[in-house]
Amino acid sequence: MRLLVRTASGVFLLAVLVAALFLGRSYLAALVALVVAVGLFEYRKLWGSVHLGPNLLILVPLAGFWLFRYAYPQVPAAQVGLVAAALAGLALTLASAPANRPVARWAVAIGGGLWLGYLPGFVLLLYVGGGARGPELVLLTAGVSVLGDTAAYLVGSRWGRHPFMPAISPAKTWEGAVAGFLLPAAAVGALLPLVLPGLATWVAFSIASVASLAAIVGDLVESQLKRELGVKDSGRLVPGHGGILDRVDSLLFVAAVMYSLLALAGAVG
């Protein structure tokens, strides 16, 4: 039953992404902004459980300006706003009582803005930088995360015997991790040259392999955060998965890696 619920939720989210991609840039930007907003809510709630909830006057503007800069890089106000949010946020800590740990809360807000504002912007960069192939590139990027997560879950739950990073996530196994790396690396590596005909095959497989590794790291990062804060899931919004952060944790890392490496290879603008 859990697998069925998990699959249905995944299919629904993928359908929403596909619809946004083919409706156009504004719809994709709105979807990414919505995911960021929910992610920020979950992030603040997580840290609030240990009395380190980041100040919304720092967290929200910072994440928003980072995301806005990627959606509309030609607007110089976005850069000005980014600097203002960071510096004004640090200045605001002086107005808080020392017992509230204002500098620690500022650091948590900066980290949240970086994670949930800066990284999601790479999804928009892939879409815009890929030109006519933008939708396919975003889908391949999501595919790395989805295929890796699915393979790791199915293989790990069925044949997993050897713990993988048990101090961070006791349920993960080496068998699942290897499957979660190999399937997206092979599938996306094979499909990338079809989407970008000028991309050499060895480059495509190299990029897909690094992206698959990034997906594993992204998942472990969020697992470590939840372990430090003593929670199982970031929320309950996505049945079978948990919260939005539980669903996009690996995707955020993958998008940044995919765009950066494709740009380095001269395949995207």
Image (cartoon, rainbow, N blue to C red):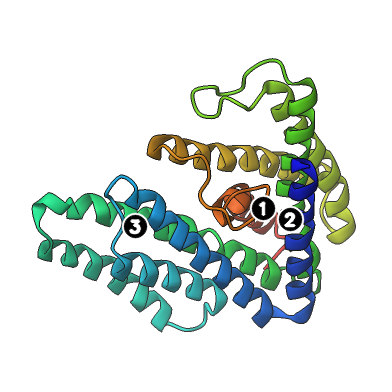
Say the numbered circle drawn on residue 164: none
- In which quadrant of the rendered image does the N terminus lie? top right
Residue pictured at 67% horizontal, 79% vertical? 27
Q: Which residue is mark 3?
A: 110
Calculate the distance from the C-alpha at mark 3 to the C-alpha at mark 2: 31 Å
Residue pictured at 68% horizontal, 22% vertical? 174
Q: Which residue is mark 1?
A: 239
Label 1 is placed on what type of residue? Pro
Question: Residue placed farthest to the front in the image?
Answer: 1
Position of 226 with respect to 47 (left or right) is right
Whether residue 169 is visible, yes or no, is: yes
Q: Nearer the viewer, residue 125 or 20?
A: 20
Judging from the image, what secondary structure is the residue with disc 2 in? helix
Asked whether the residues under the numbered discs 2 and 1 touch, taking CB atoms below 8 Å apart as contact, a structural biologist would say: yes
Residue 199 percent across, percent down from the top left: 82, 54
Q: Earlier in the sequence, mark 3 or mark 2?
A: 2
Q: Is residue 261 above or below residue 39?
A: above
Q: Earlier in the sequence, mark 2 or mark 1?
A: 2
Q: Is residue 220 above or below residue 135?
A: above
Q: Which residue is mark 2?
A: 9
Asked whether the residues under the numbered discs 3 and 2 touch, taking CB atoms below 8 Å apart as contact, a structural biologist would say: no
Judging from the image, what secondary structure is the residue with disc 1 in? loop
Q: Earlier in the sequence, mark 1 or mark 3?
A: 3
Calculate the distance from the C-alpha at mark 2 to the C-alpha at mark 1: 6 Å
Pointer 1 local density, CA inside 10 Å: few below 14, some 14–19, many at least 20: some
Pointer 3 local density, CA inside 10 Å: few below 14, some 14–19, many at least 20: many
Label 2 is placed on what type of residue? Ser
Asked whether the residues under the numbered discs 1 and 3 touch, taking CB atoms below 8 Å apart as contact, a structural biologist would say: no
